[in-house]
Each structure stands twice: as structure tokens, then as C-alpha cells.
Image: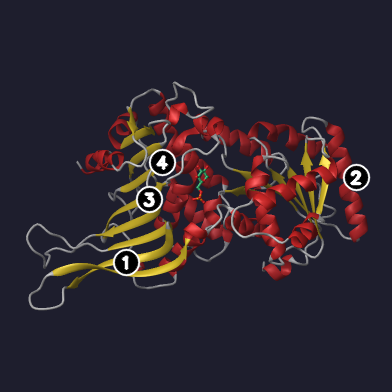
Amino acid sequence: MSAIKAKNIPTVFIIFGATGDLMAKKIAPALFHLYRNGKFPNLFKIIAFSRRDIGLEGFKEHLRTILANKKGKQFKKEDIEAFLNFFEYQQGDFEKVDAYNTLASYLGNIDGEWMACSNKLFYLAVPPSNYRSIVEHLKTSGLTKPCGPDEGWTRVIVEKPFGKNAQTALELDLLLADLFQEEQIYRIDHYLGKDMLQNILSFRFNNDLFEDSWDKDHIEKIEIRFMENIGIEGRSTFYDGVGALRDVGQNHMLQMLAFVAMDQPKTFTAGDVRTQRAEILKKLNTLSPLEVEKLTYRGQYIGYKEVEGVSPKSTTETYFKIAASISSTRWSGIPIILEAGKELEQKKEIVVTFKHREPCLCPPGVHYKNKVFFTLEPKEGITIEFWSKKPGHGYEMEKQKLSFLFRDQRKKVQYVEEYERLLLDCITGNQLPFVSTDEVKAMWNFIDPIIEAWDKNKVQLVEYKPKTKKVITDSLIVEKRLLE
Ligand code: BG6
């Protein structure tokens, strides 16, 4: 459904946890951008639900501060004020039914005023420990009942982490399934809202240059890198409980892999694309405990344990490398390298290295290999590395690049653009950039055995100096072992 149609969908957006961190960092700035870009439906209201007893005026003041402090462009005061007019505030305890009843009558009044059966979008911007009481109360207060069979939908948005392992993810799914069908559940992984990920599909399936060689016969390895120069930025309690693999590996990086490795979907619809993403993720080979020892590496930056809120005895990884593989006719035997770390040189990219045919017209011992880089950061774009003859006499080769720069990401404000796009997709009902339950399951099935072995200390936790390259070169060992 197009953004133009979205304008004609009367929608009420209900945010649970509206005074929290998620709202401040991601949801409020993204909603503001949607508003500024004229993307709100013609009939639209946002109900901020929170425990804090600050009233609508107090909440508006809170939002003013958030938007005024947001990095990037300065927002105009009159725009902020007009935006704030879309909000209503509902104070309430997630555990108590009264607030939900008030909310229900309030929603009824909005429909009466609009003379419409509005669509309801519930955003669970709260820790997963609050999900159960919210879902149960939504159910008992009848808040998610549509007005009629064809009138008004309800949808729910949930955030990563989707559980802590396969078992807890399943429990979460069962809880949501009590009230919502899979088509109503929008699981956010903001990486799916990134242009470059969506661009991988365009690059692969709208061009004929590479797709015929996009397989094990022509490709030597796929590397996914997720290196960040930042540390854990005030999120110590959360981060120390999850670690790098759960924080970015289980979700963002496996989604990057899905885009680069999946088969062509039959159509560019949510159903077909999500099915293909899930299919390739299911084919990731799970590692046995012995393989985890051999094929994974984990590290922690020096100074991490001193961060406020981190346990002084923490064994949480802030860096990992995994040499993985996929069992499929397209990819069997090809190394898939997943590497991520905090406090390192900023680099988020996918590198696809091609094989060089034999016999090779190259000097003994040398192979000229082509590489395709899908870079997310620091400069978003696509680069193809190829070999060219050096000008002049002789036949010496040199590496050259064909580059397409999409954008310089250093100027971008983190999360806002992705959330803006994803929120609009929720309103229009496009589930393509949201994670399906099958994907969640497949991703945990791959991650769980690694975390279990790490928890048993089967793989030594190596300390590394912030900004070092050493941890990156030392961990190359896992890649070598995969090829042994
Ligand atoms: C988040 C992780 O999901 O993604 C953070 O929790 C990470 O640790 C962030 O820094 C990276 O997002 P982006 O869009 O800046 O690449």
C-alpha cells in the first residue's frame, strides 16, 4: 500500500513506555520526521501511555526537551508545537486494569469524534518483562477487538531483543499469539529499515551482471563486519546481560547475511521476501561444542569492566568472530565470516570475494580476486574491486575500484531515518522490513549453541586494547581452521 493511501487510514498510535529511553532516542524523533515530511494520516492521534504522573503538559515538556536536544538539524519551534498537538497522555500502571479501561473509553471517544473505526497500532516500548501484563490487559479490556470483520485493524510493534534464546523467543511468540496473528505482529530490527540492505536486493536482482555467479562455484567467501568505534554508551546494564553476539549478531548481522545470500524471491512482496530470508537462515549450520571451540573467537575491550554498571567480573564479549557455513546447493563449503566489535575502527560492511578461475593468467603464487563491498559505514555505497593493467610498457596489474557512494553516513542521525520508514510501513501494513517468527527461530537456533559453549567457558575471552587491529588479525585463526 502506498504512502498516499496511508493518509486515508484513520490511525491511533498507542505507545506503552512513552517516557522511556526508546521513545526518546528512536520513536519520538522518527515520528517528528514523519510529521515534518507530511506522512501522518489525515486522522491521526498518538496516545502516550506511561507510569509517570506528569500529565499531558508535563509530557509535552519532556518531548520538547528531547527534540531540542536531538543531534543533527535544529527543529523549528512552531513545527515542534504543531507536532505535540497530536499527543494525548494516559498515566497508568501496566499491571492495573483501570488505566486500560480508561484507554478503551478514550479510544471509543476518538472513533466517535472521527465518525470512523480507526486502526490501532500498539507499540510495546517497554522491557519484555512488562509484555505479559500489557498483552493480558489489552485482551481483557477488549482493546484489540476490531469494530467489524473488515473495519479497523490492530497491530503490535515489538522491539529486539526477541527473547534471550530460542526458548524465550518461543514463549514471547506464544504470548503475542494469544492476541495477535502473525500478520499483526511487527518485530523491529532497524537494520531492515536501512537503505543499503534493501539496496542489496536491487543490486542482486535488478542487475544481471553478478547474479549468475552468486554461488559457491564463483564466490570464495562472504564476510560480514560490524565494527563500531563507540563503546556501550550508558547501556551497561542491558549490554552486560546480552553481549555483542546477542546485541548485533543474532539480529542485524544475520539479516545482512540473509539479504546477501538468499535466493531470489518469487515476487517483491513481504511474504515471499520474508520466506526467502527465513529459508537461508534455516540453512546455517549449527556448531557442535567442539566446532564452537575451533570456529569462534571472543574478546572484551580493556576498560569495559570499569564502565559504571558493568560487573567487575564480567565475562561478556564486546567482540566476536565466527567462521560459519551454510548447507545449500548455492553455498555449501563457502566460509561465512561474522565479525563484530565495540571500540574498534568504524566499519560496517559485507564483502563478497570472488574466486579466480584456474588456470590463472597471473604471476606464480598470485591470484587476482574481485571483491564486491556493500558498505554501510562510514560511507554508504557499493564498491567493486577489479584488476587493471598499469599504463605503459609491460603487463603489470594494479587494483582499481568502481565505486558508487550512496551517502556519507557520518552526517546521519542514528536510528531516525530507519524508524521513520519502519513506522510508516507499520501504518501501511508492509511487513517486508520486519522480522518473521520463522526468522527469529532460525537465528536463535544458530546462536544458542555458541552462547551455551561460551557460557561454559569453552572459548577463552581475550582482552583487547580499544582501537587495536590486533584482535582482528589474531582472530583470523578461526577462518584458517574452517579451511583445514
Ligand atoms: C543496536 C545495538 O541495535 O544497533 C547497538 O544495540 C548498536 O549496540 C546499534 O550500536 C547499531 O546501529 P546503527 O544503525 O548505528 O548501525
Q: What residue type is labelled 2?
A: Ser
Would you place residue 31 above or below residue 101 in this image?
A: below
* Tag 2 secondary structure: helix
Q: Does the residue labelled 4 lie within 8 Å of ligand 1?
A: no
Mark 4 Cα shell of 10 Å, populated few (<14), some (14-19), many (≥20):
many
Which of 377/421 is in front? 377
- Residue 231, horizontal then vertical, whole percent: 46, 39
* Tag 4 secondary structure: loop
Q: Give the side of residue 204 with respect to residue 176, left or right.
A: left
The residue wearing badge 1 is: 384
Q: What residue type is labelled 4?
A: Glu
The residue wearing badge 2 is: 105
- Distance Cα–Cα, label 2 vs label 1: 58 Å
The residue wearing badge 4 is: 343
Q: Residue 224 carries which label?
A: 3
Q: What residue type is labelled 1?
A: Ile
Q: Give the side of residue 143 with respect to residue 450, left or right.
A: right
